[in-house]
Amino acid sequence: MTLLTLGSLFDGIGVFPLAASRYGIIPIWASEVEKAPVSITKRHFPTMLHLGDITKIDGGKIPPVHIITFGSPCQNLSNLGTREGLAGSQSSLFYQALRIIEEMRCATNGTYPVIAVWENVMGAFSSNNRMDFKAVLESFINTKIPMPASGVWANAGMVRGNGIDMCWRLLDAQYWGIPTLAQRRRRIFLVADFRGKRAREILFKARNLQSIPASGGKDRVSSPNTSGISVKETGRNIPIIRPFQERRMRSAAKDKNETGFIGSFGKTGDPFPTLLAGSVNLFSFWYEGEEKDGFIRQLTPLECERLMGLPEGWTAYGDQDKAISDYARYKALGNSIAVPCAEYIMAGIADSL
């Protein structure tokens, strides 16, 4: 049996290596420039080689791997960002990942990598008048792809060309995991198979995922979903959690948009808004029937880890047990990938290869 290997570009805090290792895939190397995430991944993957700045990597001179993953910077693609698209200084680093993949394929006569996985924000569908996603697809298969007749990219699709099989799909974190995550986080995942026609099986086949270990403690945020059972029936108080859409709230207040401002207050059962780097994530909490004793507070880094499906304390310490600041943890978590979504794809790759 061949042991599958993985290389992670724009690695962040090692979510793709974590998901891969849970399905027997061995993380070999990673590329990341942020100090705190590098320190965190060194702690969890002490044998993984760190390559540093992606612009200085020669794909033909690094250890070849079966799978290359990359969640390239989204700042210029996001609806909350500059919307410069792939021409932006940060999101244009996408092409550096493609360069490394091509250099590795040339150096190994097309043997490695077998699979590439790209992750990015939903805004990539629409940035630059919807031409950026067209450029992404064309860059993978090196051929022209027509725009959809509707002029809008579908949330799922597939393309084949030049011997490459490629599928994409929009995954929302709130529907993934066991139990499902309590965070609304919509991200595009694209799978390219350079040596077969398995992308569809990897990205669309239904499969069971490993359960997220149960956790507890005083810092625990309950699921925003409630059963609707009264206090009288349970014999104890029922916690009520309502997340805020903080960015929407600020924007509505600035525009004096009363409807939008009221709508930014979550309802019982709503998922938490997408965790963002540098954003304040607030929620209100009270026990049923005791609203006057309720309060508003910010999510802790531990609670953010849970909303991402990470093991508790994943970002708390770095290499050599160095404590990571809350600021660095919030930033790293806001830039990260929901673990169950990454696990679903790694499970598919493990099954297919």
Image (tube, rainbow, N blue to C red):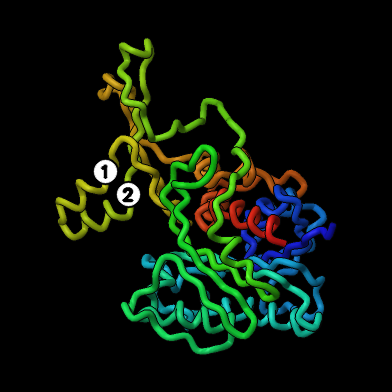
Residue at horizontal 46%, vertical 33%?
221
Is disc 1 in contact with disc 2, using a CB cutoff of under 8 Å? yes
Vertical side of 156 occupied by 338: above or below: above
The residue pinned by badge 1 equals: 265
The residue pinned by badge 2 equals: 245
Vertical side of 235 occupied by 102: above or below: below
Number of residues whose C-alpha sits closer than 10 Å to that of mark 2, classed few (under 14), some (14–19) or many (20 or more): many
Please tell me which residue lies in front, 223 or 255. 223
* Residue 216 visible in rendering: yes
Please tell me which residue lies in front, 273 or 65. 65
Image location (x, y in percent) of residue 47: 82, 55
Q: CA distance from mark 1 to mark 2?
A: 6 Å
Please tell me which residue lies in front, 353 or 83. 353
Instruction: Check disc 1 and report its element: helix, strand or loop.
Output: loop
Which kind of residue does numbered mark 2 sit on?
Gln
* Residue 278 visible in rendering: no
